[in-house]
Image (cartoon, coloured by chain):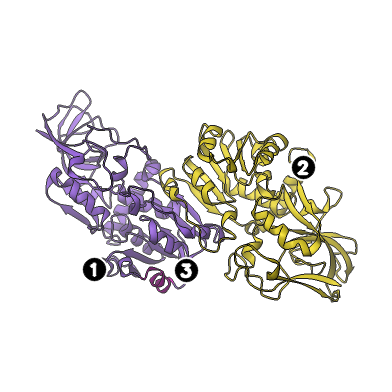
Chain colours: A yellow, B purple
Amino acid sequence: MNRRLLLKRRPRGFVVHDDFAIDDAPVPEPGDGEFRIRIEYISLDPAMRGWVNERRSYVPPVAIGEVMRAFAAGRVDKSNHPDFKVGDAVTGLIGAQTHAISDGTGMVRIDLSLAPMERWLGGLGMPGMTAYFGLLDIGQPRQGETIVVSAASGAVGSLVGQIAKIKGLRVVGIAGGAEKCRAVTQDLGFDACIDYKAGNLAKDLRAACPKGIDIYFESVGGEVLNAVLAQMNLFGRIPVCGLISAYNATELPPGPTNFGSILINRLRVQGFIVFDFAERYAEAGKALAAWQAQGRLIMREDVREGGLEAFVDVLNELYCGGNNGKLVLKV
Amino acid sequence: MNRRLLLKRRPRGFVVHDDFAIDDAPVPEPGDGEFRIRIEYISLDPAMRGWVNERRSYVPPVAIGEVMRAFAAGRVDKSNHPDFKVGDAVTGLIGAQTHAISDGTGMVRIDLSLAPMERWLGGLGMPGMTAYFGLLDIGQPRQGETIVVSAASGAVGSLVGQIAKIKGLRVVGIAGGAEKCRAVTQDLGFDACIDYKAGNLAKDLRAACPKGIDIYFESVGGEVLNAVLAQMNLFGRIPVCGLISAYNATELPPGPTNFGSILINRLRVQGFIVFDFAERYAEAGKALAAWQAQGRLIMREDVREGGLEAFVDVLNELYCGGNNGKLVLKV
């Protein structure tokens, strides 16, 4: 059977089990020019919460009754497509289910000799691309500058900080809890990491960034953004990759009261979505794989068991900082 | 005597008369390589409120006991400088006083055959430069796009909208009151103008911008910014020129709750100060003067009488929307 996670109704706040239905349907057969994928890993991404809202964000919402949208990875197990053979490992936006049919559109063939399958949903997949383009293209880092990276132990933040180190910046992470901060500095090589749960964000930022902040890689929003805004340097850049603190809010949270720093310090605050860089994925993939092979870029996955039944609980962990590295669900 | 407006103490909220002192000192004599200016017009600019705060913004604060910082225009009445002759008309950051001494640093010689003296503090001065660089360099307008311009009847906004028309955009102003809106469309040629005091900002914006908003030229902040954020198009730009609604606030006003639009719509929000473009003033000056001469750029000044004694009251009018065009005080 093809087990699928269907969206049953629009969630309010954190998703709950009743927002979804598990459905067993016959395994689908690929048509002419199509192939079938047996899915092994499903990616859990912060953006998912936005995808199930009624309101269009940067992609249309998942419709009620549809398979939950998800990046996933697996192996081709049946093919009528000339370019995809049985046994090929692939990733793509193929949904939270055990089997998917594709005509190849948007599918990427992955090389398991370079990295295990789950990493192609992490550092060598969309999160890696997001870190690469968000930091280098939007952030425009220059050697000797100071960057602050929020969600520093997460899938994207952990890579942003390491790439910034490669580029010669002072790198300060922000993460929740002493153990995450220890890993960010000792395992990933950040120069410092601030525990936002310790309650001294402004003071800790000043101590960790004695020359001020030139780049803030924004994934969380809320109080962290506001505290950083007050310490940005002239002509600083803020790539806005995510605002995870707001994704489960049932009302719009307050905006940053330090918005005026954008004017006074002539900041550039710029939102981006990795899809905007689709034409340059090959460039990023090459660079990321090379840094990984050289041991300069540590990529960590947080693989969870439990199959589709665990989807709701594992997704919510992402919004509570329960993960360490790229969160992936084994199917 | 040299009548001077001195800063007596740090204002709180709107400036009051007791924050300043009028002081009559002997008329100063220029030293070697210096010249003296008899000031005729003083420019009143939104940024002035920030200049008298304790906290450094983009320039050091005016010190207690110092002459109030101000752009001004006048004629050289005594000179020991080889390049500035008696009778030359000049502008510069020479303060709220009747006489100033200069060694020429930052002074601009102006041509009164091209425009009256007060206009060199407006459309042909810093406000003109601000509109030019803010729209063209930061805003990056493209023919056929829709721009919304806040403070549309003000010194900068009135020029931004007209330059945007020259560049082939649909131009929608926001101003306070029916008469200002009438002038913005009928006299300045904007395609539409929304009266923010009418209380239907979001609805009126939707009606005036059926294709959404590509550029928002931001001078005011607050509720206007928030309403516009919700209607920005993909890859929109927001040059942040000012946030006048917050300049007299005694506490930080709330930030925009629609901040998330920056992410979803991949906006670029970028602060700027005209001083950053000092090396290119000549380029802007030439373009502005040419458009003015061709009758394509209407420049309006709102000249007030009353001398330095009227400074406080006239400045406060600026923050209450009491002006129509560039506000200038006759000395």
| Letter of the chain that mark 1 sits on in the rendering | B
Q: Earlier in the sequence, mark 3 or mark 1?
A: 1
* Amino acid type at image mark 2: Gln
Where residue B179 is drawn, which disc sits there? 1
Secondary structure predominantly adopted by residues drawn in magenta:
helix
The x and y percentages for residue B174 are 34, 64
Q: Nearer the viewer, residue A110 or A19?
A: A19
Mark 3 nearby-residue class (10 Å; few <14, some 14–19, many ≥20):
many
Is any part of residue A102 visible from this angle? no
The mark found on residue B212 in the picture is 3
Depth check: give the residue in front, A91 or A224: A224
Q: Does B90 sit above or below residue A124? A: above
Q: Is residue A91 left or right of residue B221?
A: right
Residue at screen point 56% across, 36% down: A146
Residue behind mark 2: A292
Residue type at numbered disc 3: Gly
* Chain where mark 2 sits: A
Q: Quadrant of residue A189?
A: top right
Q: Nearer the viewer, residue B192 or B227?
A: B227
Task: Tell me which amino acid carries mark 1.
Answer: Glu
In this view, A206 is above or below A159: above
Residue A160 position, x and y percent, is: 65, 44
Q: Secondary structure at mark 3?
A: loop
| Label 2 secondary element | helix
Q: In this picture, which residue range is highlighted in magenta?
A: B200-209
